[in-house]
Amino acid sequence: MTPAQLTGQTQSHLIEHIVGAQKIQASPEAGKALIALHKEAKNKGFELAVASGFRDYERQKSIWNAKYSGQRAILDSQSNPIDISTLSDEEKTVAILRWSALPGTSRHHWGTDFDVYAKNCLPENTRLQLEPWEYQTGHQQDFSEWLQEAMPEFGFFLPYREDLGGVAIEPWHISYLSVASKNLASLTTEIIREALHLSPIEGQTAVLPLLDTLYNRFIINVRD
């Protein structure tokens, strides 16, 4: 993977896969595995769908900037909105990183990671929120329990299955281990810093001095 591929500045490492009725951009290996997982889910009565797959740098930047500027809510660990007017720039940065990756560091840049849900388990006239309660005690619980048991056979794992003090729990976020682990090992702070210099983000002056700390807490702090 090149630095541009690792940081979501190009899609040259991806190909289109048909997963159910969806067209998904993914790495060749991850896409093939996702199709197989979708087939097995269907056999078990779940209509697996991808809520979010590949996300490029500029899309991640738009999410980040909207949160940093207050145009989009920042949530606490209980999914409640935070009053950002009470936060310092450093505190705001950390609060955003609990739920949203720093542009250039999102695992969604790689085509190996997908936010998934069971479409047929979503109640009518209900919008998926991608909040933990939906998967722990809500409409996605049965699907989530099946997914945790089934996905290792297809090469997937949950990088944020528990709260390690970095990214909050994300029971919907699956990652194709064999490729994603290599990508994570290749993603250095130098590569991230260069991506941020090429396309600056809101709060960059607060982020850059903290980058080494943020890297250890939010980027490489996962369980495989």
Image (spheres, rainbow, N blue to C red):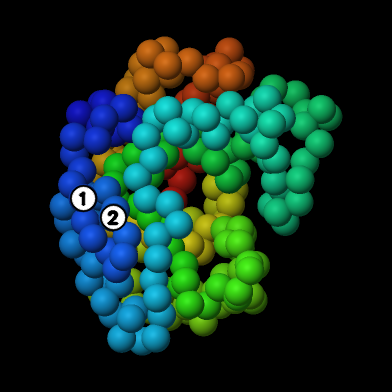
State the residue in front, 137 or 19. Answer: 19
* Side (left or right) of 126 relative to 47: right
Observer-nearest of 50 and 145:
50
Q: Where is residue 52 in the image (x, y as percent from the top left)?
A: 43, 52
User: Residue 175 versus residue 67: which sits nearer the camera?
Assistant: 67
- Answer yes or no: do the residues labelled 1 and 2 have beta carbons within 8 Å? yes
For disc 1, the neighbor class at 10 Å (few under 14, some 14 to 19, many from 20) is few
The structure residue drawn at horizontal position 55% and vertical position 47%, both measured from the top left corner, is 167
Quarter-wise, where is residue 29 in the image? bottom left
Identify the residue position indicated by label 2 in the image. 23
Tell me if residue 48 comes above or below residue 63 in the rendering.
below
**Residue 84 position (above or below residue 29):** above
The answer to whether residue 135 is left or right of residue 197 is: right
Type of the residue with mark 2: Lys
Q: Which mark is residue 143?
A: none
Is 150 rendered above or below residue 79?
Answer: below
Q: Name the residue under label 1.
A: 16
Percent from the top left, x then y, of residue 63? 55, 34
Name the side, left or right, on which 86 lies relative to 27: right
| Residue 123 visible here | yes
Whether residue 181 is visible, yes or no, is no
Q: What element carries label 1?
A: strand
Residue that lies at the very extreme toward the bottom in this rendered image: 44
Q: Which residue is drawn at 62% across and 37% down?
A: 96
* Residue pictured at 57% horizontal, 38% vertical: 97
User: Could you tell which of marks 1 and 2 lies nearer the N-terminus?
Assistant: 1
For the residues marked 1 and 2, what is the alpha-carbon distance in whole angstroms? 6 Å
